[in-house]
Image: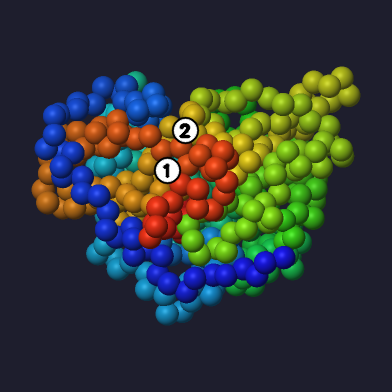
């Protein structure tokens, strides 16, 4: 097996030189009507907002300690979008058709007074006059103390990252010796606070747990996780170890395909495939089957996210806003579009709205589909290009 090589460089450098959005603002006006589509006909419905580039975990697949050490230079506070700037941009995205906003990081709960931002975003409305679906992804370390305040501020749902139940495995993966019991306590606090109770789809719970599966590291935790969460109303999802960024030493032989995950679970807990909840959903849904082979709703469901082995670019409706205001059109992007400069130069709402429209209309990203036909790693990268880091843009 080849040795993993982790480059000891600041991987954010390429992202700081982002494409200017001002030129788009000065082009032919694009007014928001909620029907924006990209070059492949994909609508804009989902906006993921990174509120911090900091995290208190050092998971090897995201922020390995060898790179993100005590000397790592995080973005200064002045570089971050303020809550008011985030809310303004979110309102303009909603006018273009965004219906769901997910707050990410880094670890979003490290952003001070995050409840204030959630309250501001909760006041926004979709083009149909409905509240936005507000959700948050967290490592769960601070969730026990913050769950009630997040719910009170208007957060609808929460997704917790948890890569195993065995304490030794979990401490080794987060690489800061954080106990799994504290994350489980956070999940219970979220449930008690009502985060996820009002799942609008009616198909599966709003409280989710995500497990990144890395072959040779934590695949033995798959069945214990299924046994623990089955019948709890919490949807457990398994994510293939992804080649996001350039600091995690990703190798294809460490990817456990979702098909193998489903096969393993099905042997102990028979499964039946379920229809997608909404168009563009990243997770493939599988329900626990009863004795007659029908979905046992009381037992619940699981999901698999197969971004390495099964591309789902064709209906991807997600945009990502970095903590310093760069708009990215793909999780595997090499360059963003600088909205912060436009905002801080005094652009009016019409200018920013038009810039967003032009950027999305020009989108043709389909990295995972290209990788699946050309091979992993360098298939879609030009010399000198590096993909944006997950810790910078959020998952």
In what element is the residue under mark 2?
Answer: loop
Q: Where is residue 78 in the image (x, y as percent from the top left)?
A: 24, 64
Q: Looking at the image, which residue is at 65% across and 70% down?
A: 3
- Tell me: 246 left or right of 121: right
Asked if the residues shown at circle 2 and circle 1 are in contact, with their CB atoms under 8 angstroms apart, the answer is: yes
Estimate how packed mark 1 is, as few (under 14), some (14 to 19) or many (20 or more) residues with alpha carbons within 10 Å. many
Q: Which of 192 and 279 is in front in this view?
A: 279
Q: Quadrant of residue 170?
A: bottom right
Q: Where is residue 312 in the image (x, y as percent from the top left)?
A: 54, 33
Q: Quadrant of residue 183?
A: bottom right
Q: Residue furthest bottom?
A: 71
Q: Nearer the viewer, residue 21 or 87?
A: 21
Q: Residue 330 carries which label?
A: 1
- Tell me: 144 left or right of 91: right
User: How far apart are labels 2 and 1 at the CA level?
Assistant: 9 Å
Q: Looking at the image, which residue is at 42% across and 80% down?
A: 71
The image's colour scheme reads rainbow
Which residue was labeled with disc 2? 316
Q: Position of residue 236 (x, y in %)?
A: 67, 42
In what element is the residue under mark 1?
Answer: loop
- Tell me: 353 left or right of 101: left
Q: Nearer the viewer, residue 60 or 349?
A: 60
Q: In which quarter of the image is residue 94?
A: top left
């Amino acid at each position: 097996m080849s040795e993993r090589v982790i480059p000891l460089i600041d991987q954010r450098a390429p992202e700081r030189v982002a494409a200017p959005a001002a030129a788009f603002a000065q082009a032919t006006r694009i007014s928001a009507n909620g029907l924006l589509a990209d070059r492949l006909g994909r609508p804009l419905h989902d906006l993921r907002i990174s509120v911090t580039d900091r995290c208190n975990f050092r998971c090897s697949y995201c922020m390995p300690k060898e790179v993100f050490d005590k000397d790592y230079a995080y973005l200064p506070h002045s570089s971050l979008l303020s809550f008011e700037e985030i809310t303004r941009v979110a309102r303009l995205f909603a006018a273009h058709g965004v219906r769901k906003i997910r707050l990410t990081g880094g670890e979003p709960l490290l952003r001070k007074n995050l409840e204030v931002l959630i309250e501001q975003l909760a006041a926004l409305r979709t083009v149909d006059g409905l509240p936005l679906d507000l959700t948050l992804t967290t490592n769960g370390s601070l969730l026990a103390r913050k769950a009630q305040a997040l719910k009170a501020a208007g957060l609808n749902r929460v997704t917790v990252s948890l890569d195993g139940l065995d304490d030794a495995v979990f401490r080794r993966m987060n690489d800061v010796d954080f106990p799994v019991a504290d994350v489980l306590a956070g999940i219970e606090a979220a449930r008690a606070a009502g985060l996820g109770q009002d799942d609008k789809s009616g198909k599966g719970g709003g409280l989710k747990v995500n497990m990144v599966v890395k072959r040779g590291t934590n695949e033995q935790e798959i069945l214990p996780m299924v046994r623990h969460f089955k019948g709890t109303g919490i949807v457990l999802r398994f994510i293939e170890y992804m080649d996001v960024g350039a600091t995690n030493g990703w190798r294809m032989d460490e990817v456990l395909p979702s098909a193998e995950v489903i096969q393993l679970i099905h042997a102990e807990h028979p499964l039946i495939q379920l229809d997608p909840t909404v168009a563009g959903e990243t997770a493939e849904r599988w329900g626990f089957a009863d004795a007659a082979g029908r979905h046992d709703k009381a037992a619940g469901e699981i999901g698999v996210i197969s971004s390495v082995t099964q591309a789902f670019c064709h209906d991807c409706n997600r945009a990502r806003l970095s903590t310093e205001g760069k708009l990215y059109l793909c999780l595997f992007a090499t360059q963003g579009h600088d909205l912060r400069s436009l905002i801080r130069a005094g652009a009016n709402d019409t200018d920013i709205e038009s810039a967003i429209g032009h950027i999305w209309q020009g989108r043709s990203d389909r990295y995972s589909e290209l990788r699946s036909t050309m091979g992993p790693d360098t298939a879609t990268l030009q010399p000198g290009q590096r993909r944006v880091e997950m810790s910078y843009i959020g998952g």
